Image (cartoon, grey):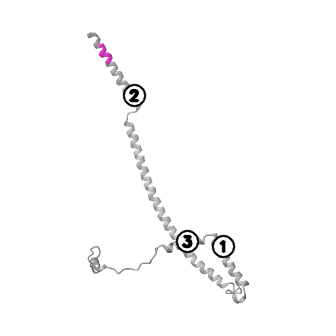
Amino acid sequence: MARANNADERRFDTPKGSRRPPQFRRSGDNDRFGRFTEWVARGMGTPGFLLGLSVFAIGWMLWNTFAPENMRFDSVAIGFTALTLVLSLQASYAAPLILLAQNRQDDRDRVQIEQDRQRAERNLADTEYLAREVVALRLAMRDLASKDFIRAELRAVLEELDRKDDEDAANAAPRS
């Protein structure tokens, strides 16, 4: 164990005086709260949540209206104050959680837009490169001999050879 400590002291990648004590890390994912806010925001926007909240509020009011007097916990006479407080508390937490979820979505959208912009730039550069290559090929094709040109040249050469053969045959005939 002592050797391990000495080896740590002899390391050259960290200055000798700047060694920090180990930091305590939170166990788990740093993004857990962000995912929780998105889960809450997605849940609050569903018909099931609205139905459940409505059933909860109606149940609360029915219980505190028709239950025996000694089992009621919120008075009808003062307008269901506790229910109002519970719903206000729920709303006060829901709004910031929804805003946090929207901010995270905005960040993801921003990253996606930047990636799309970079992809579009690459596609544009690739398209321009391919267009230049097509133009270069077209220019090179102008310099290449066409099939008709080659046939005409071959015919001309054959005619010239035939003419030379005829001349050679004519020149050879008087000698014999």
Label pair 3/2, CB-CB below 8 angstroms:
no
At label 3, which amino acid type do we have?
Answer: Trp
Residue 96 quadrant:
bottom right
State the image coordinates of residue 158 (x, y, percent, origin top left). Answer: 35, 23
For residue 94: magenta? no
Work out which residue is located at the far front of the displayed protein and give it.
1
Q: Is residue 157 above or below residue 132?
A: above
Closest to the observer: 171 or 140? Answer: 171
Marking on residue 39: 3
Q: Which residue is mark 2?
A: 151
Mark positioned earlier in the residue sequence (1 or 2): 1
Marking on residue 24: none
Marking on residue 51: 1
Instruction: Single out the mark in the foreground, 3 or 2.
Output: 3
State the image coordinates of residue 134 (x, y, percent, origin top left). Answer: 41, 44
The residue located at (41%, 30%) in the rendering is 148
State the image coordinates of residue 151 (x, y, percent, origin top left). Answer: 39, 28
For residue 167: magenta? yes
What residue span does the magenta drawing correspond to?
A: 165-170
Alpha carbon separation for disc pair 1 and 3 = 18 Å
Mark positioned earlier in the residue sequence (1 or 3): 3
Alpha carbon separation for disc pair 3 and 2 = 76 Å
